Amino acid sequence: MRPDTPRLVGEALTLGYDRRTVAEDLTVAVPDGSFTVIIGPNACGKSTLLRALARLLRPARGTVLLDGADIHRRPARQVARTLGLLPQSAVAPDGLTVAELVSRGRYPHQGLLRQWSREDERVVERAMADTGVAELADRPVDELSGGQRQRVWIAMALAQQTPLLLLDEPTTYLDIAHQVEVLDLCARLHEEQGRTLVAVLHDLHQAARYATHLVAMRDGRVVAAGDPRDIVTTELVEDVFGLPCRIIEDPETGTPLVLPAVRRSSGDGEPAPTVAGGRC
């Protein structure tokens, strides 16, 4: 692997399920140390791509490379020590406590010659502290709120101590306050711990606010990739989402803020979209 090659790369991927192809000749590289967010309309292949990058889906053609080697040719335990995953709608077994679930993140580090240790205990405690769930350690996971559960699952992923962390729609089913709470946590983990994060998000505004690297998809292909400030334009949003809009600077962060076009009457009883201005 060349020194400038990212640790996680998908090359010329054809992805699908049974006989249905979702993406063809799809290539994506995750910049090391980035908070990469994948966006796009429903059924464009976002989660399918993440599943392939996480070794959950074997490409029909092409290769996912982890540290320069085919991810499917590497031992599962070795991959799990490098790459953590928070899947969609993760569900814990009934009655499992927070501490027990977070402890499962240490399984890839266990073996015949290495059993549970004080170091494992320290890592689990740190993961719970970093995600703000330490005080919930003895609570059953199924009794927690949606935002609390997501933080516990992220704690479990942190306990794996992987430099790469993939999150598939981590804000699904959460209200806006808990969405921001989870994304703020992800941003802090990226900034303070230097982890490379890859997340699938539906909300374009949140993606532009939190991502350091944005991948925009449509119809199973990458339409644009780069810094949100460079690629989020009115043309891109209309091309990817079919949404006329205006883009202004977010007064809180300076990142692109998408304002959908206002629906106004056209005079014949039918509403017509109006877009004021272009990109600021």
Image (cartoon, grey):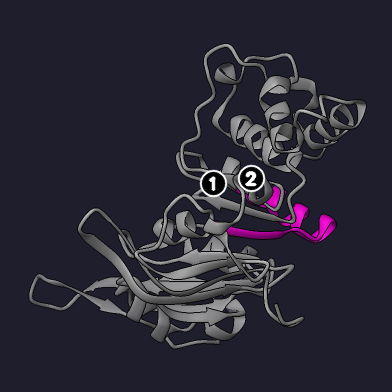
- Dot 1 lies on which element? loop
Measured Cα–Cα span from mark 2 to mark 1: 8 Å
Image-based side of 69 in relation to 46, left or right:
right
Extreme residue toward the right, this view: 118
Q: Main secondary structure of the magenta part?
A: helix
Task: Give the camera-side residue of 134 and 12.
Answer: 12
**What percent of the width, then of the height, locates residue 95?**
58, 11
User: Residue 264 lies in magenta, yes or no?
Assistant: no
Task: Give the camera-side residue of 241 and 19.
Answer: 19
- Label 2 sits on what residue type? Val
Q: Are marks 2 and 1 in contact (CB under 8 Å)?
A: yes
For label 1, the residue is: 170
Q: Which mark is residue 182?
A: 2
Q: Which residues are magenta?
A: 180-199
How would you rate the neighbour count of disc 2 (Cα within 10 Å): few for under 14, some for 14-19, many for 20 or more?
many
Q: Of circles 2 and 1, which is in front?
A: 1
Which residue is depicted at the point 41% across and 75% down? 26
Task: Give the camera-side residue of 246 and 42.
Answer: 42
**What percent of the width, then of the height, locates residue 57?**
42, 53
